[in-house]
Image (cartoon, rainbow, N blue to C red):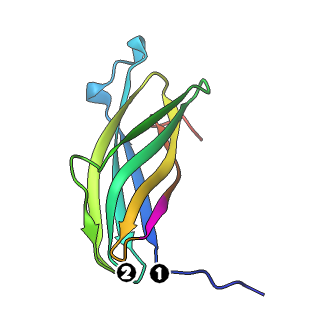
């Protein structure tokens, strides 16, 4: 039997990464990526993004955690069905890495909740098969 989950507080997160060769210096272990995130409020209440928490794991297994208020200087407020898309970047020391984390949200009824960011890969083209 499948359990019904509460969809009152639900933010869908989609991520897409792009390697930026013009800004990268592989011979100096500098690999630059942009990533575009789309958040969509699939819940039934409005919610505002308050902060972010990223966990970045490079190909050597080194982990960097990044915390901060909002995203790209904004704390978007999303009504049910609304989306917000932004692009940011990451400078890595390896040609492959994974990013994951969560956004801390606050619903219009005052309830805080987290919107998980599923792991996604940053990799130079042809590096992974």
Q: Quadrant of the C terminus?
A: top right
Name the image quarter holding residue 12. Answer: bottom left
Q: Main secondary structure of the magenta part?
A: strand
Which residue is outermost to the left?
A: 73
Residues 82 and 127: in front is: 82
> Up-down: is 118 above or below 56?
below
Find residue 45 and name its label. 2
**Image quadrant in which the N terminus is located:** bottom right
Q: Residue at x 40, y 84 (%)?
A: 44
- In this rendering, the answer to whether 107 lies above or below 45 is above
Say which of 89 and 54 sits in front.
Answer: 54
Position of residue 4 relative to residue 76, above or below, is: below
Do the residues under discs 1 and 2 have CB atoms within 8 angstroms? yes
Q: Disc 2 on helix, strand or loop?
A: loop
Q: Position of residue 53 (x, y in %)?
A: 44, 45
Query: Which residue is the site of mark 1?
Result: 8
Q: Residue at x 45, y 37 (%)?
A: 125
Among the 4 quarters of the image, the one containing residue 50: bottom left
Could you tell me residue 97's position as x and y percent? 52, 35
In the image, is residue 94 above or below residue 68? above
**Residue 11, percent across and down?**
43, 69
- The residue drawn where x is 51% and y is 32% is 96
In the image, the segment drawn in magenta is 111-115
Q: Is residue 85 magenta?
A: no
């Amino acid at each position: 039997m499948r359990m019904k989950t509460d969809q009152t507080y639900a933010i869908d997160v989609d991520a897409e990464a792009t390697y930026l060769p013009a800004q990268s210096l592989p011979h100096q272990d500098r690999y630059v990526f942009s990533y575009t995130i789309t958040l969509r409020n699939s819940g039934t209440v409005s919610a505002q993004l308050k902060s972010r928490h990223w966990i970045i794991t490079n190909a050597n297994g080194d982990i960097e955690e990044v915390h901060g208020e909002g995203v790209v200087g904004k704390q978007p407020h999303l009504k049910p069905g609304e989306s917000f898309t932004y692009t940011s970047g990451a400078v890595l020391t390896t040609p492959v890495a994974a990013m994951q984390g969560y956004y801390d949200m606050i619903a219009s009824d005052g309830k805080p909740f987290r919107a998980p960011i599923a792991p996604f890969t940053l990799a130079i083209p042809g590096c992974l098969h």
